[in-house]
Image (spheres, rainbow, N blue to C red):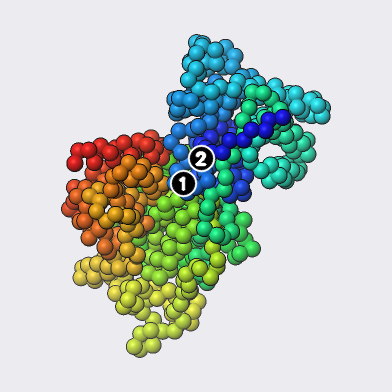
């Protein structure tokens, strides 16, 4: 029996194997148990776009990285401390990311000449010296799994191939022992997940227990590790992905607005989970419609808004392109509509399962004519909840479509989320028009609120409030069709003024010393890598400020004044400099752009090095 336990403050683990081998499930279960234990954590799932990618090839590798710690962390980690590789492809695809001294746990079962040839390896990396700088545990996980299942005759009942599929649970059990993770939650999960297939449930539970026992009894693993719970603010926490948080934020926003929620959507990676999550909420009055295409989805959502509901549509870049005409119609009709864009690598089909921030200009300008739309972006998976509520606030208060720009990194990543007290949520109650507002008892659908410039929201069928809708330009106040040049100029400028006047908070600025000359400005999911990079520079003695934008249209009113305080402004983005270009043109400052479009989030170390270069140049 092993008894030595070593305390660590943080660990980054990456689990990799063939797509279909259960790597995402394995990582998710380890994450759930770490969250239940009380660690702060961040995750990075990474998987192929193909439904069943070629087995044993680098293109078919699926991985899940989890960073868990006893303190506040911001990213899923730059490089793994531990790599679990289930085959040669998984090892070779991820080995370059492992730092010297890192730990490799590798399933030796698949290291045959044929499997090595699939990834272009003439020699076996387990024996040719390429792993000499790492701590290597070469274990036949597949055979150990089969042996464990043979004890209960499960391997013979299931068949060898089906029985070997439980090897991911053997690996999870071993990792759970190595890092002192709770086990009961996983055992309960497996029993429930495979309740309809009792032999599969029994096999996975047996493999999980065998992995734990292997770690406990073998001499190969002489030390277990412990990462204590983090000191998080008091409250009830759960682990949550960005898509799940976003869906809950939409429900909460609709509830606080006293409106039924209607989602019109067409499945698309990586946004489909928002549809899946909301489809489970029928008991809360949520209606979901899986349309035949993207155009029908947004049309139904806008129709729901016209009918007095909160219309929402969700997609990714290619789908947003198809929705653009109807979004323009929503601008003209001046009705609430929340458009969720979970960004992915583009253009065209691009990189469906990889992340990017390249739809900012599309959200701002991707429609014909002058069609201004507010844009909101969350900064972390948990923040998707609050950002969704903010999008609902703006849409309903100002009677406008609103873009909510998430991305694949936030959508699939997860972190602990403090479940809010319902009393903490803002009151977004909407007042519908119920009586005529014209001087002669008529209804003027474009008579505006002097504070918000929002027009009345009249539910169809309300007596005396008949009015015309459609995409042709409307006359001010009356809403009649108008081709008058001066009226069109007035309506275009009024719609722009309404968006410009959206009330947003001050710039979120972090400048502890107040004497920094460098400001790092970001938006969306770059918050974590920027924050981690800034922390590194501050520990090295540099005064660096950080500002992060939730509102990208309109910008915070004080942003120009904030930017003017700093001699250098650097804007890291996962695109080719879209926000940086907007900042340069709007505020006439020489913003420096740091960009990458690799389908992966920034590494904090790489970003810190780039920022160090800016400081050195000064």
Q: Position of residue 284 (x, y in %)?
A: 61, 64
Q: Is residue 209 left or right of residue 488?
A: right
Q: Residue at x 58, y 53 (%)?
A: 238
Q: Residues within 10 Å of mark 2 (few under 14, many from 20)?
A: some
Q: Nearer the viewer, residue 161 or 298?
A: 161
Residue 576 at least partly seen: no
Q: Going by the image, does 578 lie left or right of 37?
A: left
Q: Position of residue 493 (x, y in %)?
A: 24, 67
In the rendered structure, the answer to whether residue 344 lies left or right of residue 256 reads left
Residue at numbered disc 1: 73
Q: Residue at x 58, y 35 (%)?
A: 6
Image coords of residue 484 (percent x, y): 23, 70
Mark 2 secondary-structure assignment: strand
* Residue at 25% over, 48% down: 518
Q: Quickly name the residue at label 2.
A: 10
Answer above or below: position of 514 versus 259: above
């Amino acid at each position: 029996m092993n008894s030595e336990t070593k305390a660590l403050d943080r660990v980054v683990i990456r689990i990799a194997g063939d797509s279909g081998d259960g790597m995402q499930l394995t990582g998710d279960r380890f994450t759930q148990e770490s969250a239940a234990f009380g660690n702060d954590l961040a995750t990075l799932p990474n998987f192929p776009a193909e439904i069943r990618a070629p087995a044993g090839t680098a293109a078919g590798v699926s991985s899940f990285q989890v960073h868990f710690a006893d303190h506040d962390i911001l990213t899923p980690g730059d490089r793994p401390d531990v790599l679990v590789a289930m085959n040669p492809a998984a090892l070779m695809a991820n080995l370059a990311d492992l730092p010297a001294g890192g730990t490799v746990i590798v399933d030796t079962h698949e290291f045959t000449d044929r499997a090595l040839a699939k990834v272009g390896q003439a020699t076996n990396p387990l024996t040719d010296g390429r792993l000499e700088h790492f701590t290597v545990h070469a274990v036949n996980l597949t055979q150990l799994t089969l042996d464990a299942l043979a004890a209960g005759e499960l391997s013979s009942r299931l068949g060898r191939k089906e029985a070997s599929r439980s090897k991911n649970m053997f690996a999870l059990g071993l990792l759970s022992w190595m890092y002192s993770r709770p086990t009961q939650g996983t055992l309960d999960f497996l029993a429930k997940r495979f309740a309809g297939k009792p032999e599969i449930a029994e096999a996975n539970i047996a493999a999980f227990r065998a992995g734990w026992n292997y770690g406990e009894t073998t001499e190969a693993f002489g030390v277990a590790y412990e990462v204590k719970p983090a000191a998080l603010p008091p409250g009830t926490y759960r682990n949550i992905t960005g898509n799940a948080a976003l869906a809950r934020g939409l429900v909460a926003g609709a509830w606080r607005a006293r409106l039924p929620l209607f989602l019109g959507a067409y499945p698309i990676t990586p946004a489909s989970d928002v549809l899946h999550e909301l489809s489970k909420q029928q008991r809360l009055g949520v209606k979901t419609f899986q349309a035949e295409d993207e155009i029908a989805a947004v049309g139904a959502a806008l129709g729901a808004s016209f009918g007095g509901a909160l219309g929402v549509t969700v997609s990714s870049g290619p789908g947003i392109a198809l929705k653009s005409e109807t979004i323009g119609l929503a601008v003209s009709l001046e009705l609430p509509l929340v458009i969720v864009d979970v960004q992915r690598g583009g253009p065209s089909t691009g990189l469906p399962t990889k992340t990017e921030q390249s739809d900012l200009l599309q959200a701002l300008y991707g429609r014909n004519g002058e069609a201004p739309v507010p844009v909101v972006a969350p900064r972390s998976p948990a923040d998707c909840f609050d950002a969704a509520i903010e999008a609902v606030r703006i849409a309903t208060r100002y009677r406008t479509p609103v873009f909510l720009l998430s991305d694949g990194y936030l959508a699939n990543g997860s972190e602990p989320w403090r479940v809010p007290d319902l009393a903490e949520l803002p009151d977004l109650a909407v007042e519908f028009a119920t009586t005529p507002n014209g001087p002669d008892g008529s209804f003027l659908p474009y008579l505006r609120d002097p504070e918000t410039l929002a027009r009345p929201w009249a539910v169809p069928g309300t007596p005396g409030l008949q009015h015309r809708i459609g995409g042709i330009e409307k006359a001010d106040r009356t809403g009649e069709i108008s081709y008058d040049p001066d009226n069109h100029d007035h309506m275009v400028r009024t719609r722009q003024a309404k968006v410009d006047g959206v009330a947003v908070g001050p710039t979120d600025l972090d400048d502890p010393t107040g004497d920094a000359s460098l400001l790092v400005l970001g938006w969306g999911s770059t918050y974590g890598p920027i924050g981690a990079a800034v922390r590194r520079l501050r520990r090295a003695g540099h005064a660096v400020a950080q500002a992060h934008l939730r509102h990208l249209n309109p910008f915070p009113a004080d942003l120009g004044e904030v930017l003017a305080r700093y001699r250098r402004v650097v804007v890291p983005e996962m695109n080719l400099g879209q926000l940086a270009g907007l900042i340069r043109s709007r505020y006439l400052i020489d913003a420096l752009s740091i960009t990458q479009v690799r389908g992966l989030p920034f590494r904090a170390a790489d970003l810190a090095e780039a920022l160090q270069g800016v400081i050195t140049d000064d």
